[in-house]
Image (tube, rainbow, N blue to C red):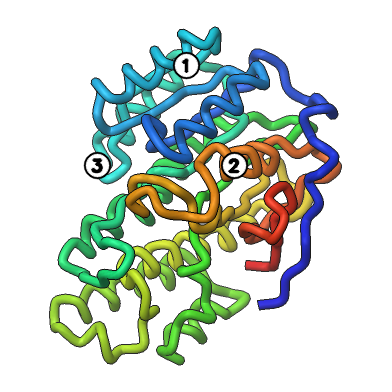
Amino acid sequence: MDSKEFDLSSSPFSDRWWSKNTVAIVTGANKGIGFALVRKLAQSELTVILTARDEARGLQAVQTLRNEGLHVLFRRLDVSDPLSINAFAAWFATNFQALDILVNNAAVSFNDIYQNSVENAETVMKTNFYGAKLLTEALLPYFRSSASKSRILNITSRLGTVDKVRNMKVKKILESEDVGEEDIEGVVKAFLEDVKRGTWKKAGWPALWTDYAVSKLALNAYTRVLAKRYGEFGSVSVNSFCPGFTQTSMTRGKGTHTAADAALVGARLAMLPPHRLPTGQFFFWGPNYDIPRNSKL
C-alpha cells in the first residue's frame, strides 16, 4: 500500500468555513474516540449530535460536555438496528435543515487483544459495516449541497486493508475499480458462511481480529464506492481514518496514544477547508501524531 504523509500541522481550525449552524453527527460517542471527537468538534462551535446505543450513558456523556460549556445534543441510536436508524433519520429531518459532517464511529469487537474468536461475527458485521452503511444511506438526502462540501468520515482500521486478505478471489473483487455495493455485501456473506461452516481459518481472511477486520474491510470498500459515486468535484467528500492503537475500552486501555490524541487528528480531517478536502482517501496514524499518512483506498 503506497502512502504519503498528509500534513495537518497548519491547523484547519484557523481557516474557518463553518458556523454554529454547521451540523455534525458522531455515532457511538458516549466514550472513547467518539466522545473525544464530539468534544473537539463542539469546541470548534459546531452543533454536534452525540449518539449512543445506551440512552443513560449517552445522556451522561452529553451532560459532562455541557458542564464544560459545550453545545452538544443527544439522540439515542443503535446502528445495528435498522428501525433505530430509520427513527433517527426521521427525527433529524424534523429538527434540522441539513447535515454537514457524519462520523461513523460506532463499532464493536468481542475479542481481547490476543484473542481471535468469531463467535459474534454477525453482530460485528451488523454494527461495524451494515450499521454505518444503512445510516449513511438514510442520511444522504439531508447532506448540505454547498461550496463547503459535506463530509463523511468512517473510523476504520488498517486491519481491514486489502493487503491483509489472503483469499485471492476476495482480493480481486475488492481491488476492482468497478467494485459495487453488491460485491461488498457478497464478500461479507461469504465470510459469514465460512464462519458457520467453521472454515474461516483456512479461507484466507485477515488473520488478526478476523471478524472485526472483515467488517472494516467492507467499510473501507464502501468508502471507495461512495467516493467514486460523488466524484472529486461532488458535494460530498468520503474518507476513512484509522486512529491506530488507541487507548480505549476496545483495547482494554492499552495503546500508543489516547483517544483525545486520535480525536484531534480525526476532527482536523473532518474539518479541512474545502480547497484541501480530498475524497476516497484512507488516512492512518502516522509517526507524527498531528501528521497522519494517507493512501488511495
Query: Residue 122 sits in which quadrant?
Result: bottom left
Label 1 and label 3: CA atoms lie apart by 27 Å
Name the image quarter holding the N terminus: bottom right
Q: Label 3 amino acid?
A: Asp
Taking the spot 60% from the left edge, 27% from the top edge, the residue there is 41
Name the residue nearer the viewer: 247 or 144.
247
Dot 3 and dot 2 residues touching (CB under 8 Å)? no
Above or below 136: residue 94: above
Nearer to me, 9 or 44: 9
How far across and how far down the image is residue 105, in percent?
A: 45, 44
Residue 190: horizontal and vertical position, in percent? 29, 78
User: If you read the primary sequence from the N terminus, does the residue marked by circle 3 or circle 2 appear first?
Assistant: 3
Mark 3 vs mark 2: in front = 2
**Which residue is label 3 attached to?**
81
Q: How far, Cα to Cα, is label 1 from label 2?
A: 18 Å
| For discs 1 and 2, the disc positioned in front in the rendered view | 2
Q: Is residue 216 visible?
A: yes
180 left or right of 250?
A: right
Pick the residue in front: 166 or 57.
Answer: 57
Say few, some or many: other residues with alpha carbon within 10 Å of mark 1 (under 14 / 14 to 19 / 20 or more): many
Asked if residue 134 can be seen in this view, the reply is no
Give the CA separation, mark 3 to mark 2: 30 Å
Badge 3 density bin: few <14, some 14–19, many ≥20, Cα 10 Å: some
Q: Label 1's element?
A: helix
Element type where label 2 sits in the image: helix
Which mark is drawn over residue 65?
Answer: 1
Residue 258: horizontal and vertical position, in percent?
A: 52, 43
What residue is at 48 percent from the left and 80 percent from the top?
164
The residue pinned by badge 2 equals 261
Point out the tag, 1 or 2, that comes first from the N-terminus: 1
- Residue at image location 47% in from the left, 43% down from the top: 104
